[in-house]
Amino acid sequence: MAKLNDIQLLRINYLRGPNIWTYRPVLEVWLDLGELEDYPSNTIPGFNDRLTAWLPALIEHHCGVGERGGFLQRLQEGTWCGHVLEHIVIELLNLAGMPTGFGQTRSTSQRGVYRMVFRARDESVARVALAQGHALIMAAINDQPFDVQAAVARVRTEVDDQYLGPSTACIVTAATDRGIPHIRLNDGNLVQLGYGARQRRIWTAETEYTSAIAEGIASDKDLTKGLLKSCGVPIPEGQVVNSPEEAWEAAQDIGLPVVVKPSDGNHGRGVTLDLRKQEDIEAAYHVAYPEGSDVMVERFIPGDEHRLLVVGGKVVAAARGELVTITGNGRSTVKELIDTQLNSDPRRGYEEEYPLEIIDLATDTKVQLELKRQDLEADSVPAAGRQVVVQRNGNVAVDCTDDVHPEVAYIAQLAAKVVGLDIAGIDMVARDISKPLHTQGGAIVEVNAGPGLLMHLKPAVGAPRPVGQAIAEHLFPSDADDEGQAGRIPLVGVAGTRSTSTISRVVAWLLHLSGHHTGLACREGLFLDRRCVEATDCAHWEAAHRLLMNKMVQAAVIESNARTILRDGLAYDRCQVGVVTDMDGVETLAEFDVHEQDQMTKVMRTQVDVVLAEGAAVLNAAIAQVADLAPLSDGDVVLYAQDGTLPVIAEHRAKDNGRAVFVKNGRVVLATGSAEHVLGALSDLTFGRNAVVPDTDALLAAIGTAWALDIAPDLIGAGIKTFEPELVPTAALRS
């Protein structure tokens, strides 16, 4: 078979928020199959066999069949290459350590052109996976060689470079499981949990509650020990030294054996234990010196190294270290034994995802010193059966949370409190952590800010601990959670074309009057309360995100339309109130392959799909296509129309005491089931000092939205009369 031409990638668009495909960010790719439109998978000789040989885990893809092997069934029956590419990309992401389950491929109005989407937690990772998947499918089609492992490695490298570290990711995942939204604030691990004034920030295992003073104290080991000692926390005697000679003198004063370590190091770097000889102590000084600003010598505490994680004043996890040894066979060198007996362990690796590190004998001076103490070097051949100590610390990976004695937990909690850390890694040495420290001469040797969580998430031995949940609970206590609204502010999304800016501005004004510092992003600008921050069209994703990142914003109103939903997705994951005014504008959306009026339902339903269960959708009942969105709302539904006798309103009111806003006998009525409350005469509900007569539909929409936000009717009426439709110049607001 002749070589077939490449699939053309016509357009790649990252949808950063809820969209027409799903609630979550996706990469949307427009594909032109070209001549491959005439070649489904079952017509290309050897294609299916090559593909499944390269990616055997494709058997786990259920596809639309809904069972294991579903996608392979589709392959054998014959499916088009756009659909196949979707599954290839998903599988490459899975193999690279970023599990992905969602994808869709749909034809467009143009023959051979498809829209393919897949879940994309990070845009750059998704683009790399797409590029590798594109190369793979063309190699499989044209029977050309392809290095799958190299492709996976490229994607994995991008994941490692771009995605959150494991400690940060576990906290974000725990927050997400509780319905708390997040925003990544930089390319690293600075993440905002929640929106606006109800947000909390984390940076790995540090939070906005983590004091800079406490961090400074924790980094100064000598100062930390002094504070702990003054509060009755058991610590080893020690002192700062300035030379190898002073280290030996200090060791003699303290009493052998001793520990030599950097005064402000972390992760066990530069720490050497159980030193008894002058030459070892002086050599250990040189190991510790590069790792910190000062070197400390302190009394050696016999026992095992332990790490206790304290979060919000409670011990939530504990892990124990192990002595790392190799056993000689009389033939292999020390280096060879380390590689075969230790580094071959699948739990060891260079990346953060591994609970244990690779031991690099060439660069690890601490290991070199440990071997020298045993009269060994890298090329030494230990006798058969000889046990050789390689590492004494830094291998804390055995879960022992359930063994922690209450008195031990109390001492760890006290240490964190004394230093002032809300999250602390307490390094403790004890023979048996299930017994009180004072009975065994145990002590706390370090208090660490920003502790790593991986040892608790992926212990080498024992059960993982839900430390992410503990930190999320610390930041957002369940007992203070208002009906599942942790991290959320009142948020209103307004979608459509008919007077949506006016509706958004009126709602923002009413929220402001109800006591909220309110942010507004609409076509008329970006506003913080009455202050216009930016006088340009701000009905787009970037402007809305700026509001959600602002700690001053206690409520937000965000305007969108069909184009912004199709281009970027919504700027928020969920909203308290979602408003849809109309289904206009189909004639302007040809570039998104939206040509028919019926297609607008799929676009505009996005605004209703994101309404919280505790919230409400506000819908224009006079437009049947809009009113038909009502069953899609997870929350309540408030209908509005000038004519309260519309069958859809009557039916809605009769069912479960549905709410509606309409005009009856020249008065605006708020109806709940059969009950009716008159807000006021329509003629009296004008805007501002000049009594501007508003568009009636826009007025009803704003009233319905405010009502859905539980703003009192009297305040709604008064707020409408005081709303000024003319934009006030920023300079005037400052005067």
Image (tube, rainbow, N blue to C red):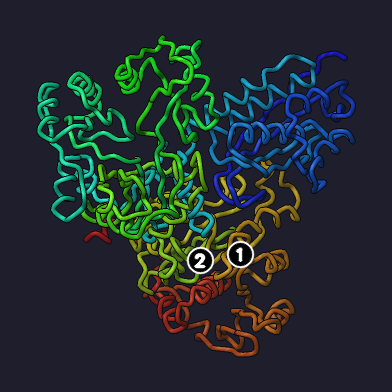
Horizontal and vertical percent position of residue 292:
22, 29
Q: Tell me the residue at 44%/11% (across/down).
A: 381
Q: Residue at x 40, y 55 (%)?
A: 316
Crowding near pointer 1: few (<14 within 10 Å), some, many (20+)? many
Provide residue 648's location: percent of width, then percent of height: 72, 76
- Residue 459 vertical position relative to residue 721 in the rendered view, above or below: above
Q: Which mark is residue 503?
A: 2
Q: Are marks 2 and 1 in contact (CB under 8 Å)?
A: yes
Residue at 31% x, 23% y: name it.
366
* 328 lies left or right of 229: right
Residue on which disc 1 sits: 581
* Sequence order check, earlier mark of 2 and 1: 2
As helix, strand or loop, the secondary structure at mark 2 comes to helix
* Depicted 122 relative to depicted 199: above or below: above
Please, what secondary structure does the residue beneath circle 1 have? loop
Q: Quadrant of residue 448?
A: top left
Q: Residues within 10 Å of mark 2 (few under 14, many from 20)?
A: many
727 sits left or right of 623 in the view:
left
Q: Quadrant of the C terminus?
A: bottom left
Residue placed most toward the observer, 85 or 316: 316
